[in-house]
Amino acid sequence: MTDTQTTDSVIRVRGIHKSFKDLHVLRGVDFDVQKGSIFALLGSNGAGKTTVVRILSTLLKADAGSASVHGFDVAATPGDVRESISLTGQFAAVDEVLSGRENLVLIAKLRHLKNPGTIADELLDRFSLTEAGGRKAATYSGGMRRRLDIAMSLIGNPPVIFLDEPTTGLDPQARIEVWQTVRKLAAGGTTVLLTTQYLDEAEQLADRIAILHKGTIIQNGTLAELKQLLPPATVEYVEKQPSLEDVFLALVGDTGEGDADDAEASTSDTAAGGVRAGKEPR
Protein backbone atom coordinates (compact mmCIF):
# COMPACT_ATOMS: atom_id res chain seq x y z
CA MET A 1 0.00 0.00 0.00
CA THR A 2 2.77 2.38 -0.92
CA ASP A 3 1.96 5.95 -1.88
CA THR A 4 2.91 6.13 -5.54
CA GLN A 5 4.92 9.14 -6.63
CA THR A 6 3.19 11.06 -9.40
CA THR A 7 3.55 14.40 -11.12
CA ASP A 8 0.75 15.67 -8.86
CA SER A 9 2.81 15.16 -5.69
CA VAL A 10 3.17 18.52 -3.97
CA ILE A 11 5.11 17.08 -1.02
CA ARG A 12 7.68 14.30 -1.47
CA VAL A 13 9.62 12.78 1.40
CA ARG A 14 12.30 10.15 0.89
CA GLY A 15 14.39 8.43 3.56
CA ILE A 16 14.28 11.21 6.15
CA HIS A 17 16.31 10.53 9.30
CA LYS A 18 16.62 12.76 12.35
CA SER A 19 18.19 12.22 15.75
CA PHE A 20 18.60 14.41 18.82
CA LYS A 21 21.82 13.19 20.38
CA ASP A 22 21.12 9.53 21.20
CA LEU A 23 17.39 9.76 20.54
CA HIS A 24 16.50 8.51 17.04
CA VAL A 25 13.22 10.27 16.22
CA LEU A 26 12.93 9.56 12.48
CA ARG A 27 14.38 6.37 10.99
CA GLY A 28 13.67 6.66 7.27
CA VAL A 29 10.35 8.33 6.48
CA ASP A 30 8.82 8.16 2.99
CA PHE A 31 5.51 9.55 1.72
CA ASP A 32 3.91 11.72 -0.96
CA VAL A 33 1.06 14.21 -0.70
CA GLN A 34 -1.06 14.91 -3.75
CA LYS A 35 -2.18 18.38 -4.82
CA GLY A 36 -5.39 19.63 -3.22
CA SER A 37 -5.66 16.68 -0.82
CA ILE A 38 -5.78 16.33 2.96
CA PHE A 39 -2.99 14.07 4.18
CA ALA A 40 -3.01 12.97 7.82
CA LEU A 41 0.18 11.94 9.58
CA LEU A 42 -1.21 9.84 12.41
CA GLY A 43 0.82 8.70 15.37
CA SER A 44 1.10 8.45 19.13
CA ASN A 45 2.93 11.01 21.22
CA GLY A 46 6.63 10.68 20.49
CA ALA A 47 6.17 9.13 17.06
CA GLY A 48 7.99 12.02 15.32
CA LYS A 49 5.08 13.92 13.74
CA THR A 50 6.15 17.42 14.76
CA THR A 51 9.73 16.69 13.73
CA VAL A 52 8.54 15.81 10.21
CA VAL A 53 6.60 19.07 9.99
CA ARG A 54 9.55 21.10 11.24
CA ILE A 55 11.81 19.57 8.59
CA LEU A 56 9.29 20.20 5.80
CA SER A 57 8.78 23.80 6.94
CA THR A 58 12.58 24.43 6.98
CA LEU A 59 12.72 24.95 10.76
CA LEU A 60 14.90 21.88 11.22
CA LYS A 61 17.47 20.11 9.05
CA ALA A 62 17.26 16.39 8.44
CA ASP A 63 20.30 14.24 9.15
CA ALA A 64 19.73 12.22 5.97
CA GLY A 65 17.26 11.80 3.15
CA SER A 66 15.50 14.37 0.98
CA ALA A 67 12.23 16.27 0.88
CA SER A 68 10.59 18.73 -1.49
CA VAL A 69 7.58 20.99 -1.11
CA HIS A 70 5.83 22.58 -4.10
CA GLY A 71 8.76 21.55 -6.28
CA PHE A 72 11.44 23.07 -4.05
CA ASP A 73 14.04 21.11 -2.09
CA VAL A 74 13.72 21.97 1.59
CA ALA A 75 17.47 21.82 2.16
CA ALA A 76 18.74 23.48 -1.04
CA THR A 77 16.09 26.20 -1.48
CA PRO A 78 14.49 26.87 1.92
CA GLY A 79 13.50 30.42 0.98
CA ASP A 80 11.37 29.19 -1.92
CA VAL A 81 9.78 26.59 0.34
CA ARG A 82 8.86 29.22 2.94
CA GLU A 83 7.22 31.35 0.28
CA SER A 84 5.07 28.35 -0.73
CA ILE A 85 3.84 27.26 2.70
CA SER A 86 2.22 28.31 5.89
CA LEU A 87 2.53 26.59 9.26
CA THR A 88 0.01 26.50 12.08
CA GLY A 89 1.50 25.03 15.23
CA GLN A 90 -0.13 23.06 18.02
CA PHE A 91 -1.32 26.18 19.81
CA ALA A 92 -2.87 29.28 18.23
CA ALA A 93 -0.16 31.88 17.60
CA VAL A 94 -2.34 34.99 17.69
CA ASP A 95 -1.59 38.27 19.45
CA GLU A 96 -4.22 38.48 22.18
CA VAL A 97 -3.69 42.22 22.69
CA LEU A 98 -4.74 42.92 19.10
CA SER A 99 -8.20 42.47 17.65
CA GLY A 100 -8.88 39.69 15.19
CA ARG A 101 -8.79 42.16 12.32
CA GLU A 102 -5.55 43.75 13.54
CA ASN A 103 -3.89 40.33 13.67
CA LEU A 104 -4.80 39.74 10.03
CA VAL A 105 -3.70 43.21 8.93
CA LEU A 106 -0.36 42.74 10.69
CA ILE A 107 0.42 39.51 8.82
CA ALA A 108 -0.67 41.03 5.50
CA LYS A 109 1.73 43.92 6.07
CA LEU A 110 4.55 41.54 6.99
CA ARG A 111 3.97 39.80 3.66
CA HIS A 112 4.14 43.21 1.94
CA LEU A 113 0.70 42.76 0.39
CA LYS A 114 -1.40 45.58 -0.99
CA ASN A 115 -4.70 46.53 0.69
CA PRO A 116 -4.14 44.64 3.98
CA GLY A 117 -7.44 45.94 5.36
CA THR A 118 -9.39 44.48 2.46
CA ILE A 119 -7.57 41.16 2.84
CA ALA A 120 -8.40 41.11 6.55
CA ASP A 121 -12.07 41.82 5.96
CA GLU A 122 -12.35 39.10 3.31
CA LEU A 123 -10.80 36.51 5.64
CA LEU A 124 -12.99 37.56 8.56
CA ASP A 125 -16.00 36.97 6.35
CA ARG A 126 -14.65 33.68 5.01
CA PHE A 127 -14.10 32.31 8.51
CA SER A 128 -17.34 33.70 9.99
CA LEU A 129 -15.47 36.12 12.26
CA THR A 130 -16.76 39.45 10.93
CA GLU A 131 -18.82 40.28 14.01
CA ALA A 132 -15.88 39.45 16.29
CA GLY A 133 -13.29 41.18 14.12
CA GLY A 134 -13.12 44.30 16.25
CA ARG A 135 -12.76 42.43 19.53
CA LYS A 136 -9.45 41.54 21.14
CA ALA A 137 -8.37 37.99 20.34
CA ALA A 138 -8.09 37.38 24.10
CA THR A 139 -11.90 37.33 24.24
CA TYR A 140 -12.23 34.62 21.56
CA SER A 141 -13.25 31.05 22.26
CA GLY A 142 -10.79 28.25 21.49
CA GLY A 143 -12.45 27.48 18.18
CA MET A 144 -12.51 31.15 17.16
CA ARG A 145 -8.82 31.57 17.99
CA ARG A 146 -7.93 28.52 15.94
CA ARG A 147 -10.01 29.74 13.00
CA LEU A 148 -8.29 33.13 13.24
CA ASP A 149 -4.92 31.36 13.41
CA ILE A 150 -5.68 29.40 10.24
CA ALA A 151 -7.00 32.55 8.53
CA MET A 152 -3.69 34.26 9.31
CA SER A 153 -1.91 31.28 7.77
CA LEU A 154 -3.79 31.75 4.50
CA ILE A 155 -2.74 35.33 3.91
CA GLY A 156 -0.83 35.37 0.63
CA ASN A 157 -2.66 32.25 -0.59
CA PRO A 158 0.07 29.66 0.14
CA PRO A 159 -0.52 26.50 -1.92
CA VAL A 160 0.56 24.25 0.99
CA ILE A 161 -0.43 24.49 4.63
CA PHE A 162 0.88 22.45 7.56
CA LEU A 163 -1.44 21.98 10.53
CA ASP A 164 0.40 20.46 13.48
CA GLU A 165 -2.25 18.89 15.73
CA PRO A 166 -4.76 21.65 14.92
CA THR A 167 -7.42 20.64 17.49
CA THR A 168 -5.23 20.03 20.52
CA GLY A 169 -7.02 21.25 23.63
CA LEU A 170 -10.25 22.21 21.86
CA ASP A 171 -13.72 21.23 22.99
CA PRO A 172 -15.87 19.04 20.68
CA GLN A 173 -17.74 21.96 19.10
CA ALA A 174 -14.51 23.87 18.42
CA ARG A 175 -13.00 20.73 16.86
CA ILE A 176 -15.94 20.47 14.47
CA GLU A 177 -15.47 24.14 13.51
CA VAL A 178 -11.82 23.50 12.69
CA TRP A 179 -12.69 20.36 10.73
CA GLN A 180 -15.12 22.35 8.60
CA THR A 181 -12.42 24.94 7.97
CA VAL A 182 -9.89 22.31 6.88
CA ARG A 183 -12.40 20.74 4.47
CA LYS A 184 -13.03 24.15 2.91
CA LEU A 185 -9.29 24.68 2.44
CA ALA A 186 -8.90 21.45 0.49
CA ALA A 187 -12.06 22.14 -1.51
CA GLY A 188 -10.47 25.44 -2.56
CA GLY A 189 -7.36 23.67 -3.87
CA THR A 190 -5.02 24.07 -0.89
CA THR A 191 -2.85 21.05 -0.10
CA VAL A 192 -3.13 20.24 3.60
CA LEU A 193 -0.78 18.11 5.67
CA LEU A 194 -2.01 17.69 9.21
CA THR A 195 -0.56 15.77 12.09
CA THR A 196 -2.85 14.28 14.70
CA GLN A 197 -3.05 11.69 17.43
CA TYR A 198 -6.84 11.71 17.25
CA LEU A 199 -8.05 8.73 15.25
CA ASP A 200 -11.48 10.20 14.58
CA GLU A 201 -9.89 13.37 13.22
CA ALA A 202 -7.90 11.44 10.62
CA GLU A 203 -10.97 9.35 9.84
CA GLN A 204 -13.16 12.43 9.34
CA LEU A 205 -10.77 14.58 7.32
CA ALA A 206 -8.05 12.74 5.47
CA ASP A 207 -8.01 11.60 1.86
CA ARG A 208 -4.97 9.57 2.78
CA ILE A 209 -3.54 8.48 6.13
CA ALA A 210 0.04 7.53 7.00
CA ILE A 211 0.67 5.88 10.37
CA LEU A 212 3.99 6.96 11.86
CA HIS A 213 5.33 4.64 14.54
CA LYS A 214 8.80 4.60 16.12
CA GLY A 215 10.13 6.93 13.45
CA THR A 216 8.90 5.12 10.33
CA ILE A 217 5.74 4.97 8.24
CA ILE A 218 4.31 1.52 8.90
CA GLN A 219 1.17 1.89 6.76
CA ASN A 220 -0.01 4.44 4.21
CA GLY A 221 -3.33 4.40 2.43
CA THR A 222 -6.92 5.56 2.23
CA LEU A 223 -9.27 4.85 5.10
CA ALA A 224 -10.89 2.07 3.10
CA GLU A 225 -7.50 0.49 2.36
CA LEU A 226 -6.46 0.62 6.01
CA LYS A 227 -9.72 -0.97 7.15
CA GLN A 228 -9.07 -3.88 4.81
CA LEU A 229 -6.03 -4.79 6.92
CA LEU A 230 -8.36 -6.28 9.53
CA PRO A 231 -11.16 -8.76 8.78
CA PRO A 232 -14.68 -7.77 9.81
CA ALA A 233 -15.76 -9.13 13.17
CA THR A 234 -19.13 -10.89 13.28
CA VAL A 235 -21.21 -11.12 16.44
CA GLU A 236 -24.32 -13.21 15.83
CA TYR A 237 -26.38 -11.16 13.35
CA VAL A 238 -24.30 -7.95 13.38
CA GLU A 239 -21.24 -7.49 11.18
CA LYS A 240 -18.78 -5.01 12.62
CA GLN A 241 -16.35 -3.36 10.24
CA PRO A 242 -12.98 -2.47 11.81
CA SER A 243 -12.58 1.18 12.71
CA LEU A 244 -9.41 3.19 12.14
CA GLU A 245 -8.78 2.87 15.88
CA ASP A 246 -8.83 -0.94 15.56
CA VAL A 247 -6.32 -0.77 12.70
CA PHE A 248 -4.05 1.69 14.52
CA LEU A 249 -3.89 -0.22 17.80
CA ALA A 250 -3.37 -3.54 16.02
CA LEU A 251 -0.42 -2.08 14.10
CA VAL A 252 1.38 -0.14 16.83
CA GLY A 253 0.08 -1.64 20.06
CA ASP A 254 -0.06 0.24 23.35
CA THR A 255 3.58 0.98 24.11
CA GLY A 256 3.15 4.00 26.39
CA GLU A 257 5.94 5.87 24.64
CA GLY A 258 7.01 9.30 25.81
CA ASP A 259 6.65 12.30 23.55
CA ALA A 260 9.92 13.11 21.85
CA ASP A 261 8.07 15.76 19.86
CA ASP A 262 7.14 17.81 22.93
CA ALA A 263 10.64 19.26 23.13
CA GLU A 264 10.20 20.50 19.59
CA ALA A 265 6.57 21.62 19.77
CA SER A 266 7.04 24.91 21.62
CA THR A 267 9.86 25.94 19.30
CA SER A 268 7.69 25.02 16.33
CA ASP A 269 4.82 27.20 17.59
CA THR A 270 7.13 30.14 18.28
CA ALA A 271 8.69 29.87 14.84
CA ALA A 272 5.34 29.42 13.11
CA GLY A 273 4.79 33.17 12.96
CA GLY A 274 8.14 33.61 11.17
CA VAL A 275 7.33 30.93 8.64
CA ARG A 276 3.82 32.28 8.19
CA ALA A 277 5.26 35.68 7.35
CA GLY A 278 7.86 34.17 5.01
CA LYS A 279 10.74 35.13 7.26
CA GLU A 280 14.02 33.37 7.90
CA PRO A 281 13.66 31.48 11.24
CA ARG A 282 16.15 32.59 13.86
Image: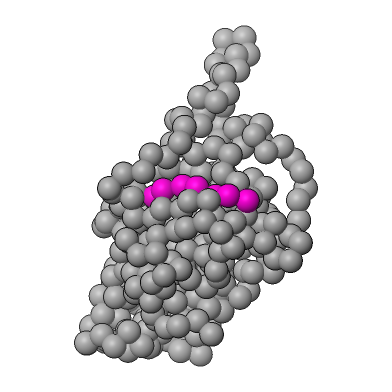
Q: Is residue 165 visible?
A: no
Residue 209 percent location from the top left of the image = 48, 43
Q: Does the magenta run of residues contain 28?
A: yes
Residue 162: tell me if it is visible. yes
Query: Foreground: 102 or 216?
Result: 216
Q: Position of residue 65 (x, y in %)?
A: 52, 56
Look at the image and say whether residue 25 sits in the magenta stretch: no
Where 36 sits versus 263, above or below? above
Q: Quadrant of residue 81?
A: bottom left
- Above or below: residue 38 compared with residue 158: above
- Image point (32%, 84%), residue name: 111
In screen coordinates, is 72 left or right of 264? left
| Left-right relation of 188 to 21 | left
**Quadrant position of residue 16:** bottom right
Query: Main SS of the magenta segment?
Result: strand
In which quadrant of the rendered view does residue 242 lie? top right
Residue 279 lies, in percent from the top left, at 42, 83
Q: Which residue is found at the position 74% from the left and 60% from the top? A: 23
Choose between 208 and 98: the one closer to the eye: 208
Depth check, front residue: 116 or 41: 41
Q: Whole-percent x and y of residue 273?
A: 47, 80
Question: Measuring 50% from the left and 81% from the top, which residue is drawn there?
Answer: 281
Magenta segment: 27-33
